[in-house]
Image: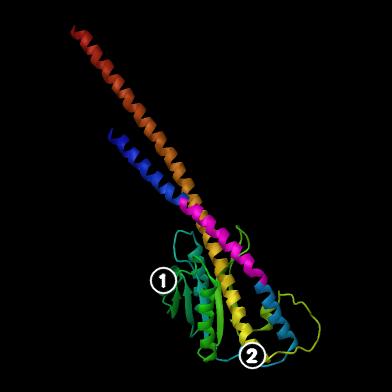
Amino acid sequence: MNNMNEIRRHIKAVEQTRQITNAMYLLSTSQMKRAISKMAFNRTYLRRIRATVKDILLHTNRQHVFLEDRGNKRQAFVVIGADKEMCGSYNNDILKAAKEIIGKCEQPYIMTVGICAQTGLEQAGFKVNMHLYGASQNPFVHHARQITEHLVDMYLENEIDEVYVIFTRYYSQTTQTIRCMRLLPLHIEDFERINVEFDKPRQIDFTPSFEEVFDTMVPQYMIGYIYSALNHASACENIARMNAMQSATKNADEMIDKLSREFNAARQLSITNEITEIAAASSLSEKAI
C-alpha cells in the first residue's frame, strides 16, 4: 500500500510538471510567431535603407565620421542572449561564440541584452559595461533606439572605433546560425548581398547636405538592424524553448505511462495478496471446523 501511495504521488508530481512544460511550449509558440511577424514588418524597411546606404557608398567618395577607419580598434559588442533559461543550448551557443570573438580584442566594450548573456560573460571573466533586460522577451523599437543612441554617442566622442552585434539569425524553424555583424564604421563589403535599385554611374545630390543626410540615415539604419537582430534572436530563443519544452512534455508522458503500469502492477499484486490471504483464512476455518 505504501508503494502504491508513493507511485500515486509521483504520478501527480509528473502530471503537474507536464502541465507547466506544455504551457511553456504553447507560450513559446505564440511568442515565436509574434517575433516572426515583427521580422516581416521590419524586413522591407531594413532592405530599403541598406540598399540606399550601399547606393551612396558606391556612387560617392565623400568623407564622413561613420566611414572612417580608425586605427585603435576599440571594439564595442552588443551580445543578444535570453533573460530566461530552459531553452536548450541557445544561451550556451551564443556565449561560446561571443567569448571566442570578444576574447581576441584588447579593449572590448560589452553591452548585453538578456540576463543570461550578462551572467555568462561575467562568469567567463569579461567586464560587461552595460546591460539591457526585457528586450529579448518582447523587443520594441525603443529598445533598438536606446542601444543605438548610446553606441553612436560613444563613437562620436571617440570612445570606441567599431560596433558589432552578435546574435542568432533565424532562417527557418530548423535552421538558425550565430552571426557577428559590423555596424560601424560602414564598409562597402558589408553590403555585398544587398541589391541596389539603380546600379548605374550617376551624380547624387544631397539635400540639405551629405553630412546631414548621413548623420540621420546611419543611426536609423543601425536602429533598423538592431531591431531586426532582437527579433531574430527572440524567434530563435523561443524555437529553442519550444523544442526543449516539447521534449520535456514527451518525457513526462512516457514517465506517466511507466508509472501507471507500475501502479497497476502494484495494485494487481495487492489484490492478489488479499485474495490469497482470504483463501488461506477460509482454508484454516474449514480445518478448524
The amino acid pointed to by label 1 is: Thr
The answer to whether residue 191 is above or below residue 137 is: below
Residue 27 left/right relative to 185? left
| Residue 289 x %, y % | 19, 6
Residue 127 drawn at (x, y percent): 42, 79
Q: Main secondary structure of the magenta part?
A: helix
Which residues are the magenta region? 23-44
* Between 102 and 171, the one nearer to me in the picture: 171
Residue 104 at least partly seen: no
Residue 88 position in % (x across, y down): 49, 59
- Disc nearest the viewer among 1 and 2: 2
Say left or right for 19 vs 227.
Answer: left
Residue 94: in magenta span: no
The quadrant the N terminus occupies is top left
Residue 229 at what x, y percent from top left?
A: 57, 71
Residue placed at 44% from the left, 81% from the top?
129
Which secondary structure lies at badge 2?
Answer: helix
Which callout, 1 or 2, points at the residue further toward the start of the chain?
Answer: 1
Task: Give the residue at mark 1.
Answer: 119
At a point 33% along the width and 23% down the height, the residue shown is 272
Image quadrant of residue 204?
Answer: bottom right
Q: Nearer the viewer, residue 222 or 257?
A: 222
Q: Which mark is residue 212?
A: 2
Q: Quadrant of residue 32?
A: bottom right
Would you call the spot at circle 1 few (<14 residues within 10 Å), some (14-19), or many (20 or more)? some
- Depth check: give the residue in front, 111 or 24: 24
Tell me whether circle 1 and circle 2 mark residues in contact (CB < 8 Å). Answer: no
Is residue 59 visible in the rendered image? The answer is yes
Task: Name which residue lies at 47% across and 74% down.
Answer: 112
How far, Cα to Cα, is label 1 from label 2?
A: 40 Å
